[in-house]
Amino acid sequence: MARIDLSNVEVMFPPSQRNGDPVTALSGLELSIGDSEFVCLLGPSGCGKSTALNVIAGFVQATDGAATVDRKYIEGPGTDRGVVFQNANVFPWLTVEKNVGFGLTLKTAKGRRDNGEKVATILKRVGLEGFEDALPMELSGGMLQRVGIARALVNDPSVLLMDEPFGALDAQTRIIMQELVLELWEQQRKTVLFVTHDIDEALLLGDRVVVMSARPGRITEDIRVKLPRPRSYAMTTTPEFMALKAHLFDSLHSEAVRADRLEARA
Ligand code: ADP
Ligand code: MG
């Protein structure tokens, strides 16, 4: 398993043709995620949540500060970190099975045999058994997102990074997918960073909920969610849950108002 540490992380994007000024997406960001911990990151749109996740994924390099996984500097993407995006980023011309197998690392003959088993195991685990030969166009949004999750998990990464994975799904499907994530976490206890807009989702899933301020993103709240595990959707109506939700709603709302004012001045 793995721990993640971001210390004084800055990400400055250089000026683009469209935008003549550099953008400081993150500045002085401090975030540590313990081994097997599930952390949800909330914050107004544009505050730098995806940028923070992409630094950990190795897609974006910090321009200052230190970003480490298990105390090793992050130098680029790696199979130790699986990533799930909002659009399941599948290849439309490959079957479910081939999509999931695509990123597997072992390509030797023996590896290929093992790979078949690995893919079958993960497809079963995410509820895609029987859909091996389906093409993405034949699948619903929820099933597509299962493919995305299977792809992220197939190399058995120690870290799972999820960037608003269920943002485009309808409410019912979303709940089913949240329950799947809870079940997977109970089985595998990976270290998870889960970015979301949705307070209920953050509280249902996370051991901690971290709130980021408007750009440049800093952490303004770091709340421990003491709801017992295993969790289920039924918990979202308990008084403890409601109290945390009201608190987070207030802090998120004031950040959103601030972000809006910043936007208006820019
Ligand atoms: P969030 O995920 O919280 O909505 P992002 O991390 O996507 O926010 O973006 C944070 C800020 O950085 C935004 O102002 C966004 O426009 C800017 N940004 C993100 N990626 C790039 C990039 N590749 N080049 C320039 N600016 C970027
Ligand atoms: Mg984002």
Image (cartoon, rainbow, N blue to C red):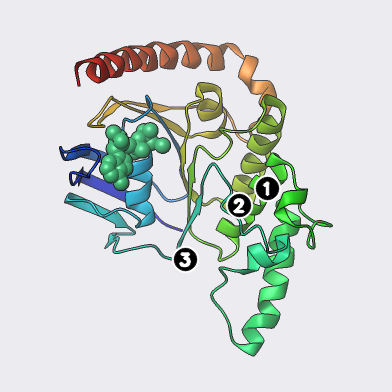
Looking at the image, residue 17 sits to the left or right of residue 117; the answer is left
Residue identifier under label 1: 144
- Helix, strand, or loop for circle 2? helix
Residue identifier under label 2: 148
Q: Are marks 1 and 2 in contact (CB under 8 Å)?
A: yes
Q: How many neighbours does mark 1 have within 10 angstroms: few (below 14), some (14-19), or many (20 or more)? A: many
Q: Where residue 206 appears, x then y in whole percent? A: 50, 34
Q: CA distance from mark 1 to mark 2?
A: 6 Å
Looking at the image, residue 176 sits to the left or right of residue 59; the answer is right
Residue identifier under label 3: 79
Q: How many neighbours does mark 2 have within 10 angstroms: few (below 14), some (14-19), or many (20 or more)? A: many
> Residue at the location (64% across, 46% down)?
145
Disc 1 residue type?
Answer: Leu
Ligand 1 found in image quarter = top left
As drawn, 244 above or below 157: above
Q: Quadrant of the C terminus?
A: top left
Say whether mark 2 is within 8 Å of ligand 2: no
Quarter of the image where one finds residue 179? top right
Q: CA distance from mark 3 to mark 2?
A: 15 Å
Residue found farthest to the front: 17
- Tell me which numbered mark, 3 or 2, is placed earlier along the sequence: 3
Disc 2 residue type?
Answer: Gly
- Helix, strand, or loop for circle 3? loop
- Helix, strand, or loop for circle 1? helix
As drawn, 250 above or below 59: above
Q: Where residue 229 appears, x then y in whole percent? A: 60, 34
Q: Where residue 47 appears, x then y in whole percent? A: 31, 30
Disc 3 residue type?
Answer: Thr
Residue 194, numbered circle = none
> Residue at the location (55% across, 40% down)?
165
Quarter of the image where one finds residue 240? top right
